Image (cartoon, helix red, strand yellow):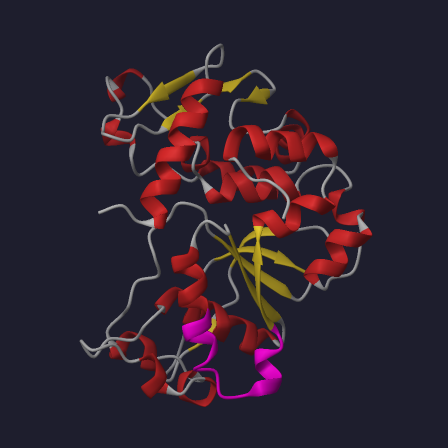
Amino acid sequence: MSTPASSLRRELSARNIGRASGLQHELSYGEVPCVVYREEGRSHGNFLDASYRAICARPDWRRRLEKSYTGAQWIPRRWDRVGRRELDCASSSDALLMNIFCYRRVLQRAGLCSLLGIEAGLVPEFGFKPLAPLQKRGVDRTEIDMKLGELLVEAKLTESGFRPAAPHLVSRYRDFEEVFDVAELLTEEGLIFGYQLVRGILAAYNTGGSFALLSDQRRGDLTESWFRVMQSVRSYSFRSRLKLFTWQEVTPHLPQRVKAFLKEKYGILPN
């Protein structure tokens, strides 16, 4: 059965197979091949040149590129090359995120900063670990895709929907029942709905900041998941610090070069 995630994967596969001609890349096996780009000198097929240069110039950003590619076993003759990375994949939401927010002076743009509710001139931190406290001793090292000042951002593109989790995994968080109405999150199977969103929201609660899901408007399933988790948050004042944005809403506030790249590679058009 076709789902919003599978439909978007098909679209991005077709787009990137078309644009990868003349660029160093590989194709995975499968009904919907994934284009896996390669670095070529100071450029990379999965990135805007300006964004990629900026990423490589900052050690903390470049470390994000080192995430290994979990789908490497589906690459023909995978043993011919080592070091394939998650952000080489054409459908990587992390690569999309960094293409936008590592682009020069993009976070100086008043419209984008106003949309996100942040100050101009912030420097993004990728792979932020807020260390959410647990009921007993210790903290959870939940990783958030991006931190912009007080704003924590979880980025999604073609990933599957948010998975549920066993109650004992979620109840170990110190503030879980203070923040959420647990009954609203229980599924028919007795699981906790939207585990990843729950952890992100708890991270924002514990840091005193805000949390946003940055998704694609073609992913109505993720939007529905977001609002289900949102309605389970007890405090109305805290709910005001929880936000949903789409790539399409962000796009009008970006430089023309970035807009053209997003349109060609991802089919992302301004609202």
Q: Residue at x 20, y 79 (%)?
A: 190
Q: Residue at x 39, y 80 (%)?
A: 137
| Residue sitting nearer the eye, 64 or 6 | 6
- Answer above or below: position of 43 versus 134: above
In the rendered view, does 238 fall on the left or right side of 157?
right
The tally of labels here is 0
Whether residue 139 is visible here, answered yes or no, is no
| Residue sitting nearer the eye, 226 or 175 | 226
- Answer above or below: position of 9 versus 40: below
Q: Residue at x 46, y 49 (%)?
A: 218
From this viewpoint, which residue is outermost toward the top? Answer: 22
From this viewpoint, which residue is outermost toward the left? Answer: 189
Q: Quadrant of residue 81?
A: top left
Q: Is residue 47 magenta?
A: no
Q: Is residue 230 magenta?
A: yes
| Residue range of the region highlighted in magenta in the rendering | 227-241
Whether residue 119 is visible here, answered yes or no, is yes
Spot occupied by residue 140 in the image (x, y as percentages of width and height): 41, 69
In the rendered view, does 271 fall on the left or right side of 18?
right
In the rendered view, does 44 fall on the left or right side of 218?
right
Q: Quadrant of residue 136?
A: bottom left
Spot occupied by residue 132 in the image (x, y as percentages of width and height): 47, 73
Spot occupied by residue 40 in the image (x, y as percentages of width and height): 53, 16
Spot occupied by residue 82 in the image (x, y as percentages of width and height): 34, 23
Q: Residue at x 68, y 60 (%)?
A: 116
